[in-house]
Image: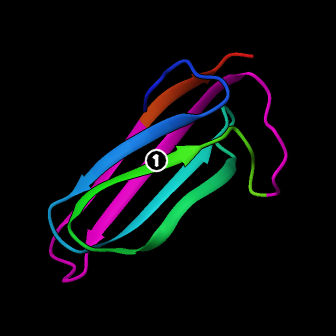
Amino acid sequence: NYPNPFNPTTRIEFALPEESIIRLKVYNILGQEIATLANEQRPAGYFVAEWNATNNLGSKVSSGVYFYKMEATSVSGERSFSSLKKMLILK
């Protein structure tokens, strides 16, 4: 993600080599899901997801350490990918 640390938004860029079902979620330091940025099927290509430091209910989250996890599974089911990264909100 860029920028990191960030305030008020950050961009998460990713590429898919083939059509895939993706899940991109944000978690707090306790491992609780805070926000779902993507949960859908997308074609091959480059994408950007923006997070404005709000939870699934639209409320602003506090400063601190958060994690985002991306999981992608090809439509054929033959390939899968998972990545977990840390980000920091400073207000």
Residue drawn at x 69%, y 36% is 30
Where residue 59 appears, x then y in whole percent?
85, 46
For label 1, the crowd category at 10 Å Cα-Cα, with few meaning under 14, some 14 to 19 and many 20 or more, is: some
Give the residues in magenta: 57-84
Within the magenta stretch, is there residue 59? yes
Figure label count: 1
Q: Quadrant of residue 47?
A: bottom left
Residue drawn at x 32%, y 63% is 72
For the C terminus, the image quarter is top right
Q: Quadrant of residue 81?
A: bottom left
Residue drawn at x 20%, y 68% is 44
Q: Is residue 49 left or right of residue 15?
A: right
Label 1, secondary structure: give it: strand
Within the magenta stretch, is there residue 34? no
For the N terminus, the image quarter is top left
| Residue on which the image places disc 1 | 69
Residue drawn at x 61%, y 31% is 66
Q: Is residue 34 left or right of residue 57?
A: left
Of 30 and 65, nearer the camera is: 65
- In this rendering, the answer to whether 32 lies above or below 44 is above
- In this rendering, the answer to whether 52 lies above or below 37 is above
Where residue 57 appears, x then y in whole percent?
82, 57
Where residue 36 appears, x then y in whole percent?
60, 58
Of 31 and 68, nearer the camera is: 68
- In this rendering, the answer to whether 50 lies above or below 67 is below
Question: Could you tell me the amino acid type at mark 1?
Answer: Lys
Q: How is the image coloured?
A: rainbow
Where residue 79 appears, x then y in whole percent?
17, 68
